[in-house]
Amino acid sequence: MASSSSGSFLRDHRPGRRRIKVGDLRVPRFRVSFYSQINRVLKGMGVEAAFDDREADMSGMVDGGERAVEEVFHRAVVEVNEEGTVAAALMAGAFTLYGMSYPEDFVADHPFAFFVVEEKSDTVLFAGHVLDPTSSQ
C-alpha cells in the first residue's frame, strides 16, 4: 500500500507526461475486497474523543448521547466485470498510458496494479493489485 494518497503521488511517479491513445484494452473480471477494524487509524488521525466515554458527545445521533464509539469497521470493494456499457466506459476512461505516441495495447494477462483516481484532485480513492489475472478467485 502506498504511504501517500496525495494527488501528486501518481502524477509524480508516472514514467512520462505525454498521454497516448489506448488500442486494445483487455482486463479480466476481478473483485478485490478489504475489511478491517480502523479504530487505531482514526485515533492516529486525531479522532479520539469519540472513543472516550467521558468526552464523546453522540447526542445528535442517539437518544441520550451518553455513548462512545467502541469499534469502527471499514469495508471496500472494487469489482470489474463485463456487465453494462457504463462499466465498459469507465474502464476505457480509467486507463491512460504514458510515453508513446501510437496506440498501445494493454492486455492484463500478467500481474497488474489498478487505481481509482478522483480526476479533479488526482486523489487516489482505491488502490490494489491483481497477482494472478488467470485465476477465477
Image (tube, rainbow, N blue to C red):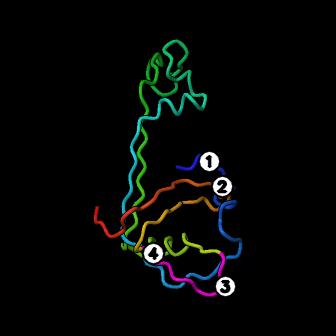
Relative to residue 40, is residue 119 drawn left or right? right
**Picture residue at 49% right of the left edge, 75% below the top:** 89
- Cα separation, mark 1 vs mark 2, equals 7 Å
Please report whichever mark, 3 or 4, sits nearer to the chain's N-terminal start. Answer: 4
Q: Which residue is mark 2?
A: 9
125 to 61, vertically: above or below: below
Q: Which residue is mark 1?
A: 4
Secondary structure beneath dot 1 equals loop
**Picture residue at 28% right of the left edge, 65% below the top:** 136
x and y percent of residue 64 in the render?
45, 17
Q: Are marks 1 and 2 in contact (CB under 8 Å)?
A: yes
How busy is the neighbourhood of tag 4: few (under 14 within 10 Å), some, or many (20 plus)? Answer: some
Q: Nearer the viewer, mark 1 or mark 4?
A: 1
User: Which amino acid type is shown beneath numbered disc 1?
Assistant: Ser
Which of the 4 quarters of the picture holds residue 47? top right
Say which mark, if any, is on residue 88.
4
> Outermost residue toward the left?
136
User: Which amino acid type is shown beneath numbered disc 4?
Assistant: Ala
x and y percent of residue 32 in the render?
39, 56
How busy is the neighbourhood of tag 1: few (under 14 within 10 Å), some, or many (20 plus)? Answer: few
**Picture residue at 56% right of the left edge, 23% below the top:** 48
Please report whichever mark, 2 or 3, sits nearer to the chain's N-terminal start. Answer: 2
Which of the 4 quarters of the picture holds residue 117? bottom right
